[in-house]
Amino acid sequence: MTGMTSQASRPQTIAEKILSRRSGQAVYAGDLAVVDVDQVMVVDSIAQSFIERMQRDLSTLPKHPERVSIVIDHVAPASTVSVAQAQKEAREYAAATGVRLFDVGRGICHQVLMEEGLARPGWIVLGSDSHSTTYGAVAAFGTGMGATDIALAAASGKTWLRVPESVKVTFTGELQPGVTAKDAALEMIRRLGADGATYQSIEMHAGDRFTRGERMTLANLCVEAGAKVGLVVPGGEILTEYGYDIPDWVYPDAGAAYVQEINIDLSALNPRMSAPSEVDNVHDVAELRGLKVDQVFIGTCTNGRIEDLHAAADVLRGRQVAPGTRLLVIPASSQVLEEALTDGTLLTLQRAGAVMGTPGCGPCMGRHQGVLAPGEVCVSTSNRNFIGRMGDKDAKIYLASPAVAAATAVLGRIALPQDLTGAPA
């Protein structure tokens, strides 16, 4: 729907504007809105439940099959016979209904949809994965839902939402060397708290700072503060260089209402790390320096993009992973993998002792490809460090940027890249 049946009578946030456009009438925080959905994304771990609801409960086909995508990424390749059977059913359903299928090896759902142009400014994108907030990197209203709501959206082409209140986060200053968007995101979560933006829209104002990939990192982590959606205000030519058409209405109005406003001075940030077992348990990496680490994992929808692999390779070049420490690297998509192959990044990582994995989620959910044993410590570039998240409940997970993760792999203990001064390079 391209227009509203009535004009907004007072200033609106981005979330209010998108939901107004897609509902055809002006709506504000607290209102209920029935909206058109531009894309429905189903991951393999929920595909079987989605198909059951479509076929058994609703007895219908997707209304707009071209707006539905199934991505096999969470346990790819299949780890058990039952998982293989569920994935087989997903392939058969896609072939029979005409919905898109991104099979094993194409990559993580959020990365793939962005690469395929299936999330765009002003769109509503529903995903059967909580980190569907990632699409807010390009000012799309991305949010996660369960199998039933996803099936209803696919069947009808619509969904209903309570319009969220908005939190305004303003980034000022410039990142210092060695500090990344991951650190900015963790600082934002620290400030807000794990439930500080529950069912709210985090609207991030960053001007022309941050690449598209960095914006994906910011939007991805918004759900860790409980947010319904995370929206980065378009700025400069960051998005237009990817071919996005940015409508002039996809910007917040001056005077829009926010329930909370915070300011983060990027120039004052140091590298951050989230310690077990909550994402908002954020510290300077320097405070945790020296802790022995068994495994380092670089990848996921948070930090598995080409710039993340470049950052890790810059640290690892000419160095070796410490004895007794495992380094697992999994590109976020086949496109990222191909870029890393072409420019020599994978060779650098391989020579340093990294173990490479199939593009996908890897051990992030704790189901395969590098789960943790009791008592093991892992530094991960992922988005969650909950108890049992990557394997045994007694394992410990620390979240950090790719550069910090790579330095940690070299020394076998939590470290900053500057700690490697004097080490072989």
Image: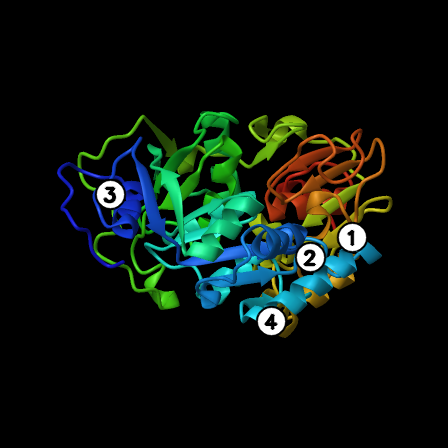
For the residues bearing labels 4 and 2, Cβ distance under 8 angstroms:
no
Q: Which residue in the protein does label 3 denote?
A: 252
Choose mark 2 or mark 3, whichever is in front.
3
Whole-number angstrom distance, CA of label 4 to CA of label 2: 31 Å
Q: Residue at x 59, y 59 (%)?
A: 310
Residue at disc 1, secondary structure: loop
Q: Foreground residue, 339 or 37?
A: 37
Mark 1 is surrounded, within 10 Å at the Cα level, by few (under 14), some (14 to 19) or many (20 or more) other residues, namely some
Residue 336 shown left or right of residue 132 in the figure: right
- The residue tagged 2 is 330
Residue hosting label 1:
369
Q: Nearer the viewer, residue 236 or 311?
A: 236
Q: Quadrant of residue 244?
A: bottom left
For mark 2, does the 10 Å Cα neighbourhood hold few (<14), some (14 to 19), or many (20 or more) residues?
many
**Sequence-earlier tag: 4 or 2:** 4
- Crowding near pointer 4: few (<14 within 10 Å), some, many (20+)? few
N-terminal of the pair, mark 4 or mark 1, is 4
